[in-house]
Amino acid sequence: MSTKFIHDNFLLENKYAEELYHDYSKNLPIIDYHNHLPPQQIAEDKTFENITDVWINGDHYKWRAMRTLGIKEAFITGTASDKDKFLNWAKTVPYTMRNPLYHWTHLELARYFDIYDLLNESSAEKIYQTTYEKLHSGDFTCRQLLKKGNVEFVCTTEDPIDNLQYHQQLAKSDFSVKVSTAFRPDKAILISNDGYNEYINTLGNVVGTAINNYSDLCDAIKNRIDFFHKNGCRICDHGLSHLYYENFTENEINAIFKKKRDHKDISNEEASKFQSAILLFLCETYHEYGWIQQFHIGALRNNNTRMHNILGPDTGWDSIGDYPQAQKLSAFLNALDSKDKLCKTIIYNLNPADNEVMATMIGNFNDGSVKGKVQWGSGWWFLDQKDGMTKQINTLSSMGLISCFIGMLTDSRSFLSFPRHEYFRRILCNLLGGEIKKGELPNDMEWIGKLVSDISYHNAKQYLEL
């Protein structure tokens, strides 16, 4: 038995799990259909200065852990040197045991840098220097990191006002990894948000037409959907607390939008009506273009006002919300399906209490037209860990068809995050291998191996029509 913590059979507890992983999953390419990688860095093939630059900067998972340990903000997002930030992360790592950060950290060091030492205060200096030398060797640019991760396809996430110049550059390049974009119109939907009017003004400038009424807004949004489509976009995403579905009239929506544009306060009820209307318009338009729609629901964002004011959003101050989900989600999907305008849909929940809701909801709208048309997405954000993924796999298996599942994604800003696919594949193979050993599944490695291969790669490739 290897003495390495990360070894060939990491997380694989018996011979069946080992065979499933090594023979049917390990070597398959990665399709990462939702992430937040910066396309500029891929287009320009950025070289990272050091391990902090590629691994710690922008990673709010690590930041939250460091703050919890009592490390000062100067060594997290502040003015400390990159080396000092790394040394403080190394100090934190031993305290992250049983958090997915511990597994991810050592998988990423092993897979990208061939480092199998445990990261801690004692090993930090050596690991910092080793990674520094490799990052400056010429073999660790953004594009090379994607190739090292066996990545075939990545889909970044852009706002409707984005000009997609870097995706255009990549489309004309000879880079072998396909890089696409997902349309993310949250800022046009969430009418109560600060800065809404300023955003709508910017959107108007982008399309070259003033947005004075709701019809203008719909025209502008469709203009951008068409632009994204012409640039290869076939998928969209929405980060919402919950799905909206309220009864409304056209006159009401026109009046609500005008009220907002006149800088008047709108009520929660008015916001819900408007958000229902614009989201239905968006989804009907996605159907017209043949897109796939994603909904990430359930986050309670920007909880710490003081730190949000200092550092801004997406810096580690979000948590799980406990919003009611089932009724509005059902009504929304039903409204689209009733018009036969429900396109392929992926729904992700952040609250694990909603697992069974999601696993059963998707079955209501899988109409036989497309394999796995409505998907319950992989464990997301706080559920993107061994326990969360295991529960998602088990619940989907019990209440749906795990065989139709399109598998894992990173949802990450880091070019070193792709071993999360390996992590998911190992967990999947170990679950199935354990049930073969117990006699709960037949020892039919060819068929169960096919199921593993499909979930690891082939289902997503077919679903995204790649």
Image (cartoon, helix red, strand yellow):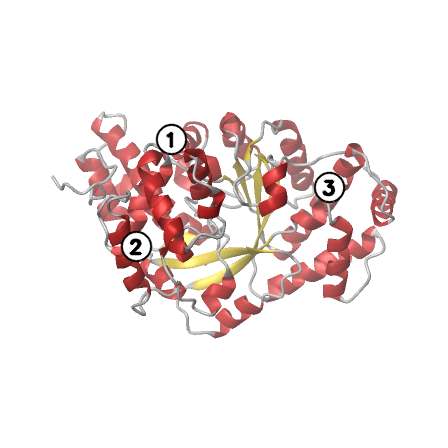
Residue under pointer 3 = 275
N-terminal of the pair, mark 3 or mark 2, is: 2
Quadrant of residue 440 within the rendered picture? top left
Is there CB contact under 8 Å for labels 2 and 1? Answer: no
Q: Residue at x 42, y 50 (%)?
A: 56
**The quarter of the displayed image where residue 438 is located:** top left
Disc 2 crowd, CA 10 A, few/some/many (<14, 14-19, 20+): some
Q: Position of residue 277 (x, y in %)?
A: 75, 43
Quote the CA–CA distance across marks 3 and 1.
34 Å
Q: Are marks 3 and 2 in contact (CB under 8 Å)?
A: no
Q: Is residue 270 above or below residue 55?
A: above
Residue sitting nearer the eye, 107 or 160 = 107
Q: Which residue is depicted at the point 46% across and 74% down?
A: 173
Give, as a three-letter code, the residue at label 1.
Answer: Asp
Residue located beneath label 2 in the image:
128
N-term mark: 3 or 1? 3
Q: Is residue 98 left or right of residue 42?
A: left
Residue 85 horizontal/vertical position (percent) = 40, 49
Q: Which label sits in the foreground, 3 or 2? A: 2
Identify the residue position indicated by label 1 in the image. 387
In the rendered image, residue 112, in percent from the top left (x then y), is placed at: 29, 56
**Is label 1 in a helix, a strand or a loop?**
helix
The 10 Å Cα crowd at callout 3, few under 14, some 14 to 19, many 20 or more, is: many
**How far apart are labels 3 and 2 at the CA level?**
48 Å
- Disc 2 is placed on an element classified as helix
> Which of 179 and 60 lies nearest the eye of the viewer?
60
Q: CA distance from mark 2 to mark 1?
A: 31 Å
Residue type indicated by callout 2: Tyr
Q: Quadrant of the C terminus?
A: bottom left
- Residue 146, compared with residue 377, is above or below; it is below
Specify whether 184 is left or right of 101: right
183 over 339 or under it: above or below: below
